[in-house]
Amino acid sequence: MSKIKFFIFCGSLIINCCMFLYAQEIVTVSLNKDKAYVGDVVEFVVEAQLPKNAQISAVQNFRLDDFEILKTNINRLPYDNNIYELKFEISAYKTGHLTIKPLTVFYINPDGTNNLFFTPEKSIEIQSLIADPKSADIKDIKSLKKLKIKGSFIVLIVVVFFFIVILAIYIGKDIKEERKKAKIIVLDVRTSSLNNLNDLYQNRTNLTTRDFYYKMSEILRTYISKQYKFDAMEMTTSEFFEKTKEFLPAQVNVNEFKNYLKIFNLARYADFMPNEKEIEDNYAFTKKLLELI
């Protein structure tokens, strides 16, 4: 009875071994170099012969200790025995005799079930560039060459420098002159406007009230047009007021200025007959505007 059990046990063991061998994947690994330096790109290739019609899953999460995986590529080789190639570009970030530990690779059986296999271990020697002074990757640092500059080139640089300085001085003077001219122009416009207003007032007896007020308005509008660069001559009284009140200084009351402008509208009518005191006050207010605005 014991012999029968022994034969049954041996038979079962043989059958299981055969099944195991039949189902076992054939996996090999290789490296394109046995030695490398830290940071070198090393090609690590895995070839796996899978059961017929089995497929390696495209979704994998590969990790390697002591190595960075730079690139991964999975391809089925054009053979009848269903061989897959997994090609990794890796780079070591430490030195010594390093072992590429087994990777877990998942694949799908023909019946749709999931399966996996492990890659064999592979060792590689990683060297340090600093520790190996004879390394071909390290080039001797050549002594620095002295920079030779010709005397004519130095003279040219000095001449160009002085030319730039002189040009900057002249440009600065031109800017100052333009600013002075602008101020002079403004002063000349104010002075000429005040002189014109004074002449008008001195000769008022030779003019009608309507002409006097028209010319006084013309002097004010001409001055403001030149001073603030807008055409005041073509504006209505309300437009002129809205535009000019932006420039009124604090010494000029806005409502007083608005009532003052209304007088020029009244002066158009023949029955407008201001007395000497009103004419003097309007002249004085116009003069004040020319002096302050």
Image: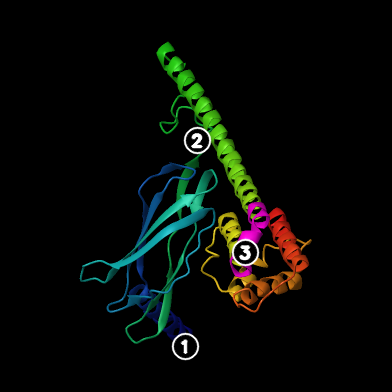
> On residue 129, which mark appears?
2
Residue ID at (60%, 49%): 189
Q: Is residue 245 left or right of residue 67?
A: right
Q: Measure the C-alpha gap from mark 1 to mark 2.
A: 71 Å
Residue on which the image places disc 1: 1
| Badge 2 element | loop
Q: Main secondary structure of the magenta part?
A: helix
Q: Is residue 118 left or right of residue 211?
A: left
Residue ID at (52%, 63%): 231
Tag 2: amino acid = Leu
Front position among marks 1 and 2: 2
**Would you say the residues marked 1 and 2 are in contact, meaning their CB atoms lie under 8 Å apart?**
no
Residue 215 in sight? yes
Magenta span of residues: 198-211
Q: Measure the C-alpha gap from mark 1 to mark 3.
A: 149 Å
Number of numbered discs on residues: 3
Tag 3: amino acid = Phe
